[in-house]
Image: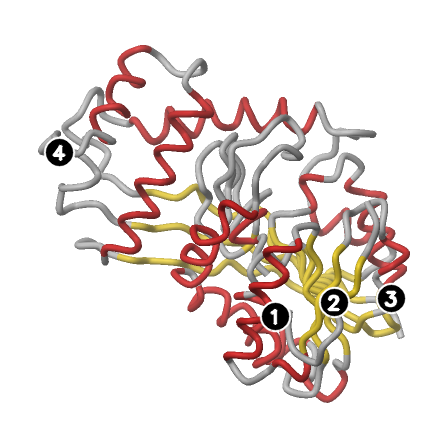
Amino acid sequence: MSTNEHTSQGHAHDRQAHHGGHGPGTGHGPGKSHGSGTGHGHAPGHGHGHGHGHDGSDLDWAAMASLLTQQAETQSPLYAEAAAWLASLAPAASVRRILDFGSGPGVVTVLLAEAFPEAEVVAVDATPELLALARERADARGVGDRVSTLRAELPEDFGALGTADLIWASNSLHHIGDQRAALAAFADVLNPGGLIALAEGGLPSRHLPWNQGVGRPGLEARLDAANADWFGEMRAGLPDTKEEIDDWGALLADAGLTPSGTRSFLCDVPAPLPAAVREQVVAHYTRLREGLAERIADDDRAAVDRLLDPAEPLSLHARPDVFLLTARTVHTGRKAK
């Protein structure tokens, strides 16, 4: 895919709310879990919540813009904490250019610009509509003079990224078949002393008690298992896919980087949920229903249908005990000076 630099001094994450988590669900996260996310999570419908083919290429990210933005905003405290941690690892004065790969609507892009006030932040995404939202968000938050956008598809367009002092990639690396080669390419982009931060993994989102009163107890754990099977097939179907142990510290070291710390950040929105977050949970289960329908038992499929039925007293639309609890893990590596 061709790259296209959208100039303007304003602009530019959250394909994270876009690439975030894996699976048919809408992983709640600002990253795009291509997945946000959003993390987010991945799911056949996407971790950031999109329905996709095995490589995620058929997802209509533009149509999901509103949901991706909502998911990212819900998890903004988590990502703001992560950005502050990165600022403690990489002094602001030494960070002049940041790449936010899989930026989506730019929620995390702006948080990075706020955490690194001396830096130019580039939102990198393949969806023009999401990059336009990133530009609008940066302008609205007063950091538009330091945020730009770059339309690119990796791994084809690594050469168009330019160099950076900090690279943020959320729930996106797992959508590249050869993750080891991608990390080596990211390492080449880093300036000496630069830092890469990979938001990969964490904990599956939870929204309901173990005994949810609809179908058999433990529904979410079984949906997670079905989603894990889907994710394995998605990875196996990617171009040039290579099977790797998800030891991100070892993979960073093999790319010539020094592992510089790993931390997990919590998103905890207790019941009763605000209406906007409840809508995200409903969207998550809708995507799970669409993406995992043939992978789950008949009684679990019926339980999900009841949870999505507005006329059901114990549905996600009405029950007071729905919550959102998840965690995102960030792995870092530094290039030698």
Q: In the image, 38: left or right of 19?
A: left
Residue 209: where, in percent of width, then height?
A: 22, 38
Q: Which amino acid does label 1 sit on?
A: Arg
Q: Nearer the viewer, mark 4 or mark 1?
A: 1
Q: What residue type is labelled 3?
A: Gly
Residue under label 1, please give it: 135
Q: Residue 284 carries which label?
A: none
Q: Quadrant of the C terminus?
A: bottom right
Q: Do the residues labelled 1 and 3 touch (CB within 8 Å)?
A: no
**Earlier along the polypeptide chain: callout 2 or callout 4?**
2
Q: Residue 6 carries which label?
A: 2
Q: Nearer the viewer, mark 3 or mark 2?
A: 2
Q: Residues within 10 Å of mark 1 (few under 14, many from 20)?
A: many
Residue under label 3, please give it: 162
Q: In the image, 57: left or right of 204?
A: right
Separation (CA) of disc 4 from disc 1: 41 Å
Separation (CA) of disc 1 from disc 2: 9 Å
Q: Do the residues labelled 4 and 3 touch (CB within 8 Å)?
A: no
Residue 245: where, in percent of width, then height?
A: 70, 35
Q: Which residue is drawn at 86% across and 51% down?
A: 184
Task: Farthest residue to the top: give it.
Answer: 298
Q: What residue type is labelled 4?
A: Leu
Q: Do the residues labelled 1 and 2 touch (CB within 8 Å)?
A: yes
Residue nearer the viewer, 107 or 84: 107
Q: Residue at x 87, y 52 (%)?
A: 185
**Earlier along the polypeptide chain: callout 3 or callout 2?**
2
Q: Nearer the viewer, mark 1 or mark 3?
A: 1
Q: How crowded is mark 2: few (under 14 residues within 10 Å), some or many (20 or more)?
A: some
Residue 294: where, in percent of width, then height?
A: 44, 13
Residue under label 4, please give it: 314
